[in-house]
Amino acid sequence: MLITCPYCGPRDLSEFTYQGDGNRTRPAPASQDLDAWNAYVYDRLNPAGDHNEIWQHSGGCRSHLRVVRNTLTHEISSVGFVRGDAHARKPGARK
């Protein structure tokens, strides 16, 4: 599977680390709501179809990416930076 990093271009899956479900909402750090923390840590969906995921380009530019991947075909429909592309350079650009 190839993931096209917006910064580095197309790269093999082995350069990336899965960081988790991109749809999950973390409870407030000071929250003592045990049900909310339990749901955040342990409850998982297993969707069939497009799924929003967070990946890190750990073997490359180390950027965190938001990837929309079809869980049935592994086809990737979009890739972008988690925090937007305000600081991103064009693919293939070098310093």
Image: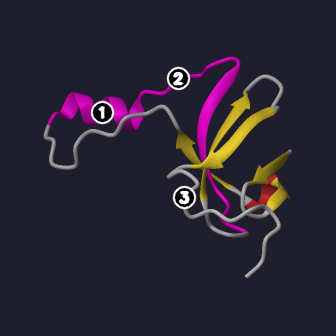
Q: Nearer the viewer, residue 82 or 56?
A: 82
Quick one: label 2 or label 1, which is nearer the N terminus? Answer: 1
Per the image, the residue denoted by label 3 is: 86
Drawn side of residue 45 relative to residue 41, left or right:
right
Where 33 sits versus 45, above or below?
Answer: below
Secondary structure at badge 3 equals loop
Q: Which residues are magenta?
A: 33-59
Per the image, the residue denoted by label 2 is: 45
Cα–Cα gap, marks 2 and 3: 31 Å
Quadrant in the picture for residue 20: top right
Cα–Cα gap, marks 1 and 3: 34 Å
Q: Quadrant of the N terminus?
A: top right
Look at the image and name its color scheme. secondary structure
Residue 44 locus on image (x, y percent): 49, 27
Q: Residue at x 78, y 77 (%)?
A: 94
Quadrant in the picture for residue 48: top right
